[in-house]
Structure formats: C-alpha cells, structure tokens
Image (cartoon, helix red, strand yellow):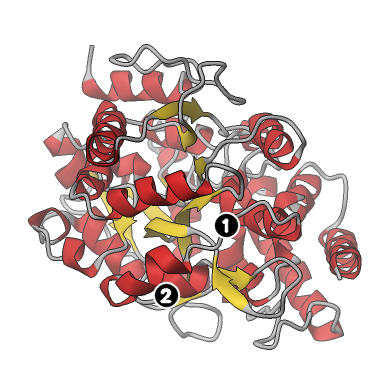
C-alpha cells in the first residue's frame, strides 16, 4: 500500500480507530472505567502523538502518585462536537481535565458562566515569561460573574490557518519545470487557482478542482477559513472595547461582498460539488487524493500526514502564506490556542498537581513533534529545537511566518462571540448561499441579526 493511500484511509476512518497499545476505544462521550482523575483528550491523529500523551500521563503518575484515566474524544463532525459539549455543559459526568480542539476554546466562556472551571493563575503566572507572545492573553477571561480577569486555561499549543497546494500538479498543468510564482494580491491569488482549474480541464485533468475550500456548516473549518475573508475585506466585528460593530451599514455591505467572494468559488464550480457536505476531515482527504489544487486548513495536519514520504512532503507539496487583504496589507492571523482546562470540583487540587507536573515534562515537546508539527509550541525554549528550525521544511517555516503577525479571537474581547462560533453563524450563511437558499445580501442581513440576538441574550 502506498503511503498516500494509507494516510487517506486513516483520515477517512478517523472516528473509528482505536488506541492500539492501550486498547481504549475512542468515544465521543466518555468511559465507565473510573480512576483518580478523568481526562478527556482530543483524539490524536498519529500513533506518535498518542504515544506521547500516554507517556506524559505515565510520567505524571510516577512523579505525583496520581492516576489518570484517559478517554479519547472525537469532535470531527458537528454532531460529535455537540454531543461532547452537551455532556460537558449538562449535569452528567464531566471530566476533571479536558484538552480539546477549537470547540473547547469557544466552550470555555459558557463553562465560566456556570462556574465550572478552575482558574489556573497559580500554575501559569510563575511560567509567564516562558510562553510565546499572545498565548496567555488568549486564555485570560472574566472569572464567572466577576469583572476581574483570570487565566482560565492551560495553553499547550497554538496555530493559524494555513494554505497548501500541489507544486507538481501546477507544473504538469502548465507544462513547466517549476511551479509558477504565487501572487500576493487578494484577487490575483484566487484568480491563479481559477485559471489553473480551467487549464487543468483543458489538459485532461477532469477530476481536479482549483480550490478546495469547505462550504459546509458541518465543518468547523468553514468558519475558521472565512475569518480570513472577513479580515481581508476590512470587516471589524467587535472593537477593542468589546462593542459590537457589525450592525453598522458599512460593515453589512462588506460582509455581503465577503460572502459573495467565498461562495462564488462554489457557484462558479471551482470547488468540488460535495463541499457543502464536508466534515473537518474531507478537505484534507480531497486534497490528498489530488482532487483539489489547493486548500486551507487550521492546522498542519495535511503536510504532517505526508512527513514519512519525503518526496511528497518536500518536493511535491507546497505551503504559502495568505495573500494580502484588499487594502494591500498583510493579513493578521487569528491566534488559535489549543487549551486544556481543569474543572472546578472535588478533584481540582489533584488535577492542578498533575498539570503542574506535566508542564515541567519535556514530553510536551514530543507531543507536538509526534503530531507531525500540526501545532506550534507555546514555550519559547521549544521553538529553538531543530525540529522547528529546519530551513528545508517550508511547511513549518510558512506556519511560523503566518502566525508572526496576529490578532486575538473576538471572543477574547467579548465572550458573547463564542456563541457565534458555537452556532456556526458564518458557516451556515455560507452553506445557504452556496446552495442557492439565500442571496449574499439576505444571508448577510440574517447573519448580522443572529449575531445581534446572540449578544443581546448573552448580556
């Protein structure tokens, strides 16, 4: 079996795999096997990542004497994510420690309002100088009903949204020996992929689509990618004081244009027709099957999946930073931090002991390296590792450059925006426009009204 075939199959079967060495099933809800601490952990993509998680908790048990039962959760579809969130927010069994994907960061403000999370200033504050810029601010929120702020989550990794493309396909389509230069102007950038889509069809590549962006509300990637379109069009949803700006007439017009731009790829048939049904894994799969020339993804999981195939990783696949916004200026990356939270319960003290021990463990470096560099390290000391500084590894170098210039997510400025993410307001608007259910204008108006309602209800 070829390496690429193996990766594609493993990605498409992501919710069905099991943790080989431990024998624990991957479950969206939890385990009945009780130990001192219940840990829910986002399901690892790779065996090396899983092994690092197991080793870290074995080491913390050895040092602290506190046992942990790890349950791997899957949130790859909207149904799975909603099930996990309902379990955590409900009155049923919840974990003591929870490390999750983007769905967790948008869940944190709700948990804070219910006083479900423990502040972790006592763990993080002594280490503040060791973290890279921005990640501590990303996990600092108002504590419950208090107006004072506290550090409410442990940052373990961070990332932006990255763009990948097939260099060898561009060469074959254009009959050239090296891939063409990628434009940095917004419209020129997207026109490149449209032009090569048309050229691919003329050259007999009948299954290749120029652009592999999701159009589905079932994929969290849709909203993550669209954030860059919002910023490219100069849309400011919340000001620095946390005030909602989206209801201004000028912002609505810009939103209409951004929706028309994004969904235009689908309407003009530059995107696979089933992209309105994709889950988070599907844009990866379609790209790795050579069905799309380019795609965007909020981790480095796509090149990471090919790391053992050096020809593909280094020579055939490329990564590139986002084009400039419509004003010609570089886009800010929306800083996304992978967080670990400790629940406020009778086991909080033990959980803090375990996590404090974990943060002293070099196994955290192995965790990120085992993830094939999907996420970037939050510790300054880790950044100097050879793994992150291989100049031949353009994927990691582009990822580092992408997040150099960043802004915090809107929910850091106003927690109400977390519910906009949870309800997938932008993703649903995109799917409705792509499928012809709504015009861009009506979808923009409805999205703005939904956001305003969410803010009113939250406050």
Residue 132 visible in rendering:
no
Q: Disc 1 on helix, strand or loop?
A: loop
* Disc on the earlier residue, 1 or 2: 1
**x, y percent for residue 122:** 43, 67
Q: Which residue is mark 2?
A: 134
Image quadrant in which the C terminus is located:
bottom right
Q: Which mark is residue 118?
A: 1
Q: Residue at 52% across / 48% down in the picture?
A: 348
Image quadrant in which the N terminus is located:
top left
**x, y percent for residue 290:** 38, 32
**x, y percent for residue 435:** 78, 41
Q: Residue at 25% across / 29% down in the picture?
A: 51
Residue 309, compared with residue 33, is above or below; it is below
Q: Nearer the viewer, residue 72 or 430?
A: 72
Q: Nearer the viewer, residue 45 or 342?
A: 342
Question: From the viewer's perspective, is the residue at label 1 or at label 2 nearer?
Answer: 1
* Residue 404 placement, left or right of 439: left
Q: Quadrant of residue 443?
A: bottom right
Count of marks, rendered view: 2
**Dot 2, crowdedness within 10 Å: few (<14), some or many (≥20)?**
some
**Dot 1, crowdedness within 10 Å: few (<14), some or many (≥20)?**
many
Residue 447, compared with residue 14, is above or below; it is below
* Residue 75 placement, left or right of 44: right
**x, y percent for residue 57:** 31, 35
* Residue 106 placement, left or right of 359: right
């Amino acid at each position: 079996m070829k390496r690429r075939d193996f990766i594609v199959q493993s990605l498409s079967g992501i919710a069905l795999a099991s943790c080989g060495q431990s024998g624990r099933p991957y479950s969206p809800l939890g385990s009945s096997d009780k130990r001192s601490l219940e840990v829910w952990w986002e399901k690892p993509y790779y065996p090396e990542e899983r092994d690092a998680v197991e080793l870290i908790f074995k080491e913390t048990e050895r040092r602290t004497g506190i046992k942990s039962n790890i349950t791997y959760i899957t949130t790859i579809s909207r149904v799975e994510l909603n099930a996990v969130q309902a379990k955590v927010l409900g009155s049923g069994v919840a974990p003591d420690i929870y490390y999750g994907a983007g769905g967790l960061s948008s869940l944190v403000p709700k948990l804070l309002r219910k006083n479900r999370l423990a502040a972790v200033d006592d763990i993080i504050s002594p280490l503040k100088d060791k973290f890279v810029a921005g990640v501590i601010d990303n996990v600092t929120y108002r504590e419950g009903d208090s107006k004072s702020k506290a550090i409410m989550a442990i940052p373990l990794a961070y990332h932006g949204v990255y763009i990948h493309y097939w260099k060898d396909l561009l060469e074959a389509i254009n009959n050239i020996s090296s891939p063409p230069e990628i434009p940095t102007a917004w419209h020129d950038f997207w026109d490149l992929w449209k032009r090569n889509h048309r050229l691919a069809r003329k050259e007999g590549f009948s299954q290749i689509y120029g652009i592999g962006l999701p159009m589905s509300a079932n994929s969290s990637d849709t909203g993550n990618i669209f954030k860059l379109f919002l910023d490219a069009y100069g849309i400011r949803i919340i000001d620095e004081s946390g005030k909602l700006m989206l209801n201004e007439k000028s912002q609505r017009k810009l939103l209409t244009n951004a929706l028309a731009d994004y969904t235009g790829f689908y309407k003009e048939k530059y995107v696979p027709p089933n992209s309105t049904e994709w889950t988070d894994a599907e844009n990866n799969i379609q790209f790795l099957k050579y069905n799309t020339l380019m795609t965007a993804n909020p981790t480095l999981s796509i090149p990471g999946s090919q790391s053992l195939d050096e020809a593909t990783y280094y020579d055939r696949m490329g990564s590139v930073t986002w084009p400039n916004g419509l004003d010609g200026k570089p886009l800010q990356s929306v800083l996304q931090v992978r967080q670990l939270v400790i629940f406020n319960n009778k086991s909080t003290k033990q959980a803090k002991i375990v996590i404090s021990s974990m943060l002293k463990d070099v196994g955290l470096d192995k965790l990120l390296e085992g993830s094939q560099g999907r996420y970037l390290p939050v510790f300054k000391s880790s950044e100097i590792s050879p793994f992150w500084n291989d100049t031949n590894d353009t994927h990691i170098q582009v990822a580092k450059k992408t997040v150099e210039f960043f802004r915090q997510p809107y929910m850091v400025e106003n927690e109400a925006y977390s519910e906009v993410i949870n309800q997938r307001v932008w993703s649903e608007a995109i799917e409705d426009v792509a499928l012809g259910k709504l015009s861009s204008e009506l979808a923009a108006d409805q999205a703005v009204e939904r956001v305003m309602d969410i803010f009113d209800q939250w406050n």
